[in-house]
Image (tube, rainbow, N blue to C red):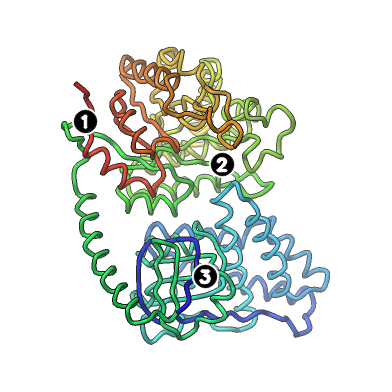
Amino acid sequence: MRIYKGVPASPGLVLGQVSRLERSYDTFNRNPHSPKKEQRLLENAISIAQSELESMASRSATSEQAIFMFQSMMLEDDGFMSEVRSYIAAGTGAAAAMQRVGQRFADQLSAMTDNPYLQLRSVDILDATQRVINILGDRPRERLALDHPVILAADRLMPSDLFSVPAGMIMGVITSEGSAQSHAAILARARNIPGLVQVGRDFLNDCDGRMMVLDADNGICILDPDSATRQQMVTQICERQRQNEALTQLQTLPNLTRDGEPFELLANCFGPEDIDSAVQSGAQGVGLLRSDYLMLPGKMPDEQEQYFYYTACLAAAQGRPITVRTFDFGSDRTLANVYQGEQSAHLGLRGIRSSLRQPRQFETQIYALLRAGARGPLKVLFPMVTNVEDWDAAMRIVERCRQNLRERSVPFNENMPFGIMLSIPAACLTAEEFIAHGCQFFTIGTNDLTQYTHAAGREVTSAERYFQPASAAMRKLIRMAVDAACAGGIPINIAGLAVGDPANLVQYLQMGLRSFSMSPQTLLDAKRVLLEADAHVL
């Protein structure tokens, strides 16, 4: 009996036989044809690959469609394909060119540690390029041949690996590397398949065909469990089934505090995939969609690409409202290298300040958002707003975009709500002025508001004791914002890491807040806390 540790990717506990997924590695031994013929072969392979991906998207759940559509779009990306064509023109075979460029792009995204949305896209690029390579090599792209349910093990899993297996044949997934935020992990969570990542190569080399306990709740797996361990696991599996039934009952309860006050639970998300996870956890909508996570390195998405992203998010939300935060680039953001010096500092030109200095880029985003708003309930949130001058300048651009869309006869939402993120003390102190200038809703951003109030960056370990989301100063600022919203008759929401803390959550509730936005993973615990809390303290 051997125990291995890993990182939980999808919760659950199972006992079963391991089946290792072996991947073939391409050597590209054949001599390439002429560049012209290789290019024709590539175009034909891409056409077949896109047809297969579109077919997979049509057969998948709404939340999964965006994964395969992204892969299809990647195969027609100008930057990506121009590199492939350059290699072919230089005498490289089409398959080898695809492999080289795909790996480079995937490595580039994988290194973006501050952008989980793009990090998980790295595997999508490998998945799509491998599909084209297999077509070029006339290799099959069919379902994995499984004749009984197994725990699937691999170095890392592609989205198409899970999608290509008949329902019920995968009891669990385990990988030697990979990320808990990968698309395969997201698909596993969506399908309630327990998963563990980063278990290590030693496990992978010694697992095929053996019995295993996969405890994804505690991040461990046990190869060749003895009889006592097996019996213990069976007992725990039965107990977990009872707990799941209780959890399902919790989700069906109305969102009312113990003293009968209604509340709203929303999720902080970065794309269609985790929106689906949030919906399954009971989110009533998306309180904060971080739009800057859709960026490709060094490339600003055009209006159509952004429109697709926002509409994919709306589809994943299944009619629930989504609040999109406009681009918020800064020193800790992926595209910070687009800007220089002060304008990318924490206390420099982040958020709406940066957008107002880049009006064409900002207009492109507003066009896409207004158009997507015609497809579902969408609201727009401006981050890092300091004063009404920021607000007025942003809304002048919004009105200019509206007028242009009218002239273009493009359908859009004329009445899309626009609001601000209260992340700077100055904005909280003058919150009523924004309402007088037409602001339609507030979101309190606890992460930035805490660090700007206390002059303590949340990533600076030496200043950690000053980063206090529940301090007296924070309570005063939040009360000011709540009072202004109530007086002005507009909705107010609170978001950030602090909202997931039970003690903070009850405190915010008793300060008058009724709408909370947090990580999807904390939604059910938050509901349990709020159901047992009193909104009004005697």
Label 1 belongs to which residue? 534
Q: Are marks 2 and 3 in contact (CB under 8 Å)?
A: no
Instruction: Locate residue 137: give its quadrant.
Output: bottom right
Instruction: Locate residue 55: give its quadrant.
Output: bottom left
- On screen, residue 306 versus residue 379, left or right, reads right
Amino acid type, residue under disc 3 in the picture? Thr
Q: Nearer the viewer, mark 1 or mark 2?
A: 1
Compared to residue 511, the image places residue 54 above or below, namely below
Q: Residue at x 54, y 75 (%)?
A: 203
Q: Residue at x 36, y 85 (%)?
A: 148
Label 3 belongs to which residue? 175
Q: Earlier in the sequence, mark 3 or mark 1?
A: 3
Q: Residue 292 shows which numbered tag?
A: 2
Task: Give the CA distance from mark 1 to mark 2.
Answer: 37 Å
Q: Earlier in the sequence, mark 2 or mark 3?
A: 3
Q: Secondary structure at mark 1?
A: loop
